[in-house]
Image (cartoon, helix red, strand yellow):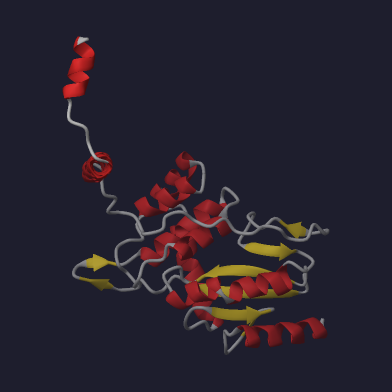
């Protein structure tokens, strides 16, 4: 029969030749898979580059504009001030008042916020023994250069007051320190940045923006600084326990003063 004749005429392969053909076929499949993967990676990389190029760069922003929300788990005892209601946090019945004089541009104040302030909150504020008061002392921008008058410390303090109008002072306080520029008077603490942080914290934008545009708390911040100087404050951070300024700012020094005040009361 014709088909049988054709099949009988076809050369037969040895087992080695068949194995070699199978290896060659497998190699071609692997090469196709690898080439396909490389093509997909290249296409994805090009797409990412095109996307990045077309994204607007925010010149008026800081590396980490997302603020950490302050821990507001304070004891629910009588006379408690909600943590975000005023520039004070802790129980109103607390016998010891710790006042911190600070400038939001101050690097040492940021370190105090990251370390000592958290220890103070855990050991004394949450137990109802101590309440903490933030006292603005905007002074690091009292100068000018190249025809520009600095006002970054004042703008940051004003913005914190504007956030306080919406009962979010401490959230904004944390956001300012979390996003503190590397260096003082860098030109980054602008009204636009304050509005950006407020938006990311979920504050009412219209209310906050009007507060900043009107410079509602401009005179308040100036008066705060004058009061601090009259009190004897010469730098930041400066700590007072029940109105008495401390010579040091380490947690050990603050804790010793607190325990002494608690015993006296």
Which residue is located at x 46 percent, y 58 percent? 158
Give the x, y percent position of residue 19. Answer: 28, 43
Regarding residue 50, the answer to whether it shows in the image is yes
Q: Is residue 91 above or below residue 32?
A: below
Look at the image and tell me whether residue 217 can be seen. no
Residue sitting farthest toward the bottom: 247
Residue 91 locus on image (x, y percent):
75, 64
Rendered position, 118 above or below 28: below
Q: Is residue 221 above or below residue 84?
A: below
Q: Is residue 47 above or below residue 142?
A: above
Location of the N terminus by quadrant is top left
Q: Looking at the rendering, in which quadrant would you find the C terminus?
A: bottom right
Give me the residue at 46% from left, 39% from top: 206
Where's residue 245, x and y in %? 61, 84
In the picture provided, is 197 more to the left or to the right than 44? right
**59 and 152: which is toward the camera:** 59
225, 99: nearer the viewer: 99
Horizontal arrangement in the rendering, residue 241 relative to residue 225 (left or right)? right
């Amino acid at each position: 029969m014709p088909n049988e004749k054709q099949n009988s005429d076809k050369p037969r392969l040895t087992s080695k030749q068949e194995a070699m053909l199978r290896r060659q076929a497998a190699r071609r499949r692997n090469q196709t898979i690898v080439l396909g993967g490389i093509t997909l990676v290249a296409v994805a990389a090009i797409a990412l580059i095109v996307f990045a190029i077309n994204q607007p760069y925010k010149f008026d922003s800081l590396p980490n504009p997302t603020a950490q929300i302050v821990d507001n788990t304070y004891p629910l005892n009588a006379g408690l001030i909600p943590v975000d209601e005023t520039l004070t946090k802790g129980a109103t019945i607390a016998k010891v008042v710790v006042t911190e004089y600070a400038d939001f541009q101050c690097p040492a104040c940021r370190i105090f916020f990251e370390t000592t302030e958290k220890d103070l909150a855990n050991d004394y504020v949450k137990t109802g023994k101590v309440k903490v008061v933030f006292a603005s002392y905007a002074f690091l921008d009292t100068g000018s250069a190249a025809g520009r008058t600095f006002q970054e410390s004042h703008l940051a303090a004003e913005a914190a007051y504007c956030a306080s109008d919406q009962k979010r002072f401490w959230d904004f306080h944390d956001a300012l320190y979390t996003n503190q520029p590397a260096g003082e008077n860098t030109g980054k603490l602008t009204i636009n940045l304050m509005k950006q942080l407020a938006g990311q914290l979920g504050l009412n934008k219209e209310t906050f923006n009007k507060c900043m545009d009107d410079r509602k708390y401009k005179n308040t911040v100036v008066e705060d600084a004058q009061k601090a100087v009259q009190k004897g404050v010469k730098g930041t951070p400066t700590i007072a326990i029940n109105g008495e300024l401390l010579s040091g700012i380490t947690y050990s020094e603050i804790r010793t003063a607190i325990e002494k005040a608690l015993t006296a009361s």
